Image (cartoon, coloured by chain):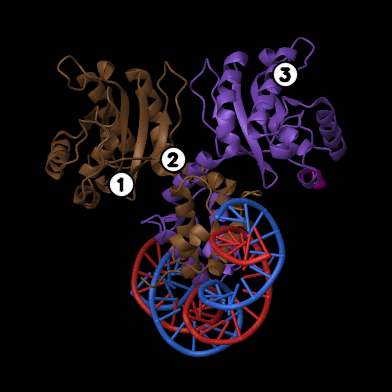
Chain colours: A brown, B purple, C blue, D red
Amino acid sequence: MPGQVQSIARAAAILRLLASSSGRLGIGEIARSLNLPKGTAHGIIRTLQDVGFVEQDKTSGKYQLGATLLHLGTSYLDVNELRSRSINWADPLAARSGEAVRIGTLLDGKVLVVHHVFRPDDILQTLDVGSLLPPHATALGKVLLAYDVGAANAVTQREPEPYTRRTLVKARALTRALSEIRDNGWGAEIGEMTPGEAGIAAPIRGYGGLVVGAIGLSGPVDRTCDGSGNPRPALVTYVRDAARAVSRDLGATRW
Amino acid sequence: MPGQVQSIARAAAILRLLASSSGRLGIGEIARSLNLPKGTAHGIIRTLQDVGFVEQDKTSGKYQLGATLLHLGTSYLDVNELRSRSINWADPLAARSGEAVRIGTLLDGKVLVVHHVFRPDDILQTLDVGSLLPPHATALGKVLLAYDVGAANAVTQREPEPYTRRTLVKARALTRALSEIRDNGWGAEIGEMTPGEAGIAAPIRGYGGLVVGAIGLSGPVDRTCDGSGNPRPALVTYVRDAARAVSRDLGATRW
DNA sequence: CAACAGTGTTCGGCATTGTCGACCGGGGTT
DNA sequence: AACCCCGGTCGACAATGCCGAACACTGTTG
């Protein structure tokens, strides 16, 4: 594959940088971070500003992401197969289980949330479509890792961040959990991200049987798990049924 | 202001094109639409693909927007002043009024929705943060146009699309409505976008008193309007109060 | 079955293009 | 008032990416 277009790659790097470091950035900081001459960085940013991908704060002169990106990002949702197919099944799952439902896919080794249905009884929740979740501490993430050896290796390579006392950080514990998920066909997370919260997820397969995403629910431990601390079998069945239904919609015939 | 970086501007045009024509596009179609040689378009798209801004459908070879854009887009929301300041006031407004609340700003002469609170009693609504609404047929849009002469002129220039029988399409009717909004300090829309639905909105002012956005609610006519077909005064007050509160948060002292 | 009309992709020469570093102008701070 | 850092500008040089033709492939058509 021949080389990339330099300026576009640089522009993308700038956008990524602006996204990661939340808040505004000056042109000097940007140029320094990416080892670019100030003039060059300025030229790129000027263009990005003209097309609306970045905006400049009048008073401080610093730059931030632009509104056009928001529109482009949500336009992606309209096209996304995984999301459009799964919407029809996410609502019933949320209704049957009474918990919040999320659908995610792997992006750069993290979990990108492409759909989110609020828990039916509570409307004051923040929508996190578009946000990135840690793969090792969420049910969605562990399921996705279980079927993507490359990403799994990348995560186990260096010890991931512990969120709670129960977060799996050791490579052995994690690989073991992933293997278990492959055997069962579903995965769970209990208090590994937030104490008292648990999640259950199952893989979504696309055409050819390849895992392209995961669907799962999450809620308080005392509602999602039974007395012995295991995920409620009924909820597991709901989740697996939903995953299977979406997979069928996506054309995963061999299943 | 010196010229733009050609390749970046072209890349942005491609992304815009992919966003507007929902669905996948072949490289030939893209090149033709933008009057680019096929080879050039391919080079740009290849790099866009490398950075994750576009994805290629393996079977058909066609291109679509990529997942990275979704993340960038939502990252924008975290930075956006208007949104972060208004969230605290949108929820109470939705609770007090019992209707769905949206906050929008002008982007390319259309209304970009930056925040959306569902109607409290109904959870099965589609979230439309990031989508673009027609400016001439929504309460949010008309308020924004009322305080942006440039955008208003652009809209009245050529007759906009009529959605219902009540949609204002004539330039005279529209400019008159905008002038009325300026006099009142708030605006409404009754069945101009969807029959039986109405909306009420008020401008949000930023630092220096400049209008930077609008906040409004929308719901069925029989709930949002009184017997004589006018917006319920109580709801109008709620909306204006919310708009004022957000404006104060944004630093619009002179108010 | 072969010619065709599409597709996405590659390649190399030419010159357009964007990069680069030094140079402005202005706000803060010291 | 000297300084430092900011964002922005300019122009010369050459590296860069553009361009058009050629390629490999698929599905369709005569």
Q: Does the segment drawn in magenta span residue A14?
A: no
Dot 2 amino acid type: Gly
Q: Quadrant of the N terminus of chain B?
A: bottom right
Occupied quadrant, residue A50: bottom right
Q: Position of residue C29 (x, y in %)?
A: 57, 52
Q: Is residue A118 left or right of residue B116?
A: left
User: Could one spot residue B27 in this view of the protein?
Assistant: yes
To which residue does mark 1 refer?
A: A207
**Element at label 3:** helix
* Closer to viewer: mark 2 or mark 1: 2
Height in image: C6 above or below C11? above
Q: Position of residue D17 (x, y in %)?
A: 51, 73
| Label 3: few (<14), some (14–19) or many (≥20) C-alpha neighbours in 10 Å | many
Q: Does the segment drawn in magenta span residue B158?
A: yes
Look at the numbered discs 2 and 1 and tell me whether their residues touch, using CB distance below 8 Å. no
Per the model, the C-alpha gap separating discs 2 and 1 is 24 Å
**Element at label 1:** helix
Occupied quadrant, residue A26: bottom right
To which residue does mark 3 refer?
A: B236
Q: Position of residue B168 (x, y in %)?
A: 79, 33
* Closer to viewer: mark 1 or mark 3: 3
| Label 1: few (<14), some (14–19) or many (≥20) C-alpha neighbours in 10 Å | some
Per the model, the C-alpha gap separating discs 3 and 2 is 33 Å
To which residue does mark 2 refer?
A: A130
Residue numbers of the magenta segment: B155-159
Q: Which chain is home to disc 2?
A: A
Per the model, the C-alpha gap separating discs 1 and 3 is 51 Å
